[in-house]
Amino acid sequence: MVRELKITPIKNGTVIDHIASGLALDVLRIINVQSLDKDSTVSVAIRVRSGKLGWKDIVKVENMELSPRKVNAIALITPQATISIIRDFKVQEKRSVDLPDRIVGILRCPNPNCITNQPEPVESEFEVTERRPVILTCAYCDRRVESFLNHLA
Amino acid sequence: MSLHGRDVISIRDLSREEIEEILTSARKMVPFAEGKKAMHPLEDQIVAMAFFEPSTRTRLSFESAVQRLGGSCITIADAAASSMRKGESLYDTIRMLSGYAEAIVIRHPNEGSARLAARASDRPVINAGDGAGQHPTQTLLDLATMQEAFDTLTGLRVVLLGDLKYGRTVHSLAHALALFGSEIVLSSPPSLGLPDEVLERLEHMGGKVSTEPDLHKAVRESDVLYVTRIQKERFPDESEYRKVAGSYRIDASVLRDAKPRLIVMHPLPRAGEIAPEVDDTPHAAYFRQAFLAVPVRMALLNAVLGAAKRGG
């Protein structure tokens, strides 16, 4: 069987796989690719055949490991994603993203009058009040949030 | 009482049993609130009134409650005169205040401000209204008014009339009515209906909720008519306000088919929603409701602070 290689392997870095199709660019936004080293290659595959999902996106980033906060943000928008840490071309660790009970600092509260949107020394904070589908509630003003893409901080 | 030292930010912070305890205590506080008897459980204690938004009734009834309990107050009555005008954050202001007083009562125009204050303060914080958010002590005094009139909070049919979208008092009240098993009838202009998330929460609690836009039909067979003011200051757009301003008014004709024991309540101030002719009918309960603010807030402050006397 001939293997078709659409994205080259990376030596060290992170592979975010099983991203819901069409959300790779949002994942790049969360990772904040502009802040990475200039010599870090970022590979993006959009609409890749997947046995599990039908279609999926994949993002590979060289020389970067995700902070727990960024993993939480990815879990919010595409909860079925998996994260693999690559060292010397080998998968050192592979895990699913896991949505915690509280989401701190990742989203802006959609309520413009919420105290967390004022110049106060405080981070936004949401409780995960439902998991399927994910619904968050602002820990300060009680506003419910059901779509997250437009509210990423 | 289990409320000792606790923050009271939302009515949802209180269990049904805790609400009942406060209401029972409030009934006993009435002669003290009227000045016929004296008590001093807050002697030597200071309560800070941090009011960053205009208020007459809420601030004065809290101040009266503190003084009737033998305590004293320090007050920010005007945000423009406080150091917040110089750019100080609410967080810093509250942190500082918590060093000056045993408890803080806060009113602020931003939703979530009272939760922020509770995190900033190591003293108990009582929410006296955060924007269009929560106003738990208003709910407690609303419940006290209904309980005084009917001797129960279960099985009543309560019409919530007016601005059910921005009116913070009705969100908290609807929660409490569902908690006690009373029926809620919603009556509002279409653009000012109860927000979906509040409605879903009530349904989740098993609350009996129906909608009746026709005021005359809603009033018939009801025990309580809870009227709210359409609050211009809460509307993001003035044209939206103008569309609904003055869209309902309670007068003798609305009450003609009402039950003899129906009570009309209003958190006040009213702005034309209730005709003065209603004031002299047995239905008018809003001035009694305003008075009950004092014994209810006394009961709450006593529960939160009463046993925390210096050295006690």
Image (cartoon, coloured by chain):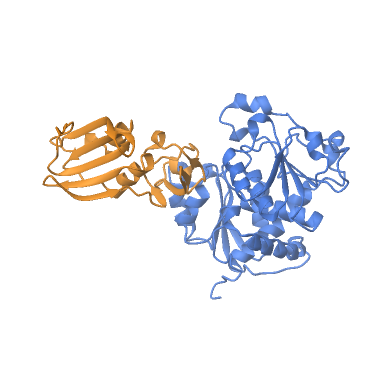
Q: Quadrant of the C terminus of chain A?
A: top left
Q: Residue A5 is drawn in which quadrant?
A: top left
Q: Which chain is orange?
A: A
Q: Residue furthest bottom?
A: B312
Locate residue B127, reporting x and y percent.
Answer: 57, 52
Which of the 4 image quadrants contains residue A24?
Answer: top left
Q: Quadrant of residue B190?
A: top right
Q: Position of residue B35 (x, y in %)?
A: 76, 63
Residue B59 locus on image (x, y percent):
63, 51
Question: Nearest the camera: B233 or B143?
Answer: B143
Is residue A88 toward the left or the right of residue B126 in the image?
A: left
The residue closer to the viewer here, B140 or B287, is B140
> Residue sitting at 50 percent across and 42 percent down?
A144
Chain B tint as drawn: blue
The answer to whether residue A135 is left or right of residue B289 is: left
Residue B204 visible to an observer of this rendering: yes
State the image coordinates of residue A105 (x, y, percent, origin top left): 37, 45
Q: Residue at x 70, y 61 (%)?
A: B23
- From this viewpoint, is residue B60 visible? no
Q: Quadrant of the N terminus of chain A?
A: top left
Count of labels shown? Answer: 0
Instruction: Using residue A120 as the reference point, say whether residue B33 is left or right of it.
Output: right
Q: Nearer the viewer, residue A88 or B229?
A: A88
Q: In the rendered image of this protein, does residue B291 appear above or below residue B233? A: below
- The residue that appears at 59% across and 32% down in the rendered structure is B235
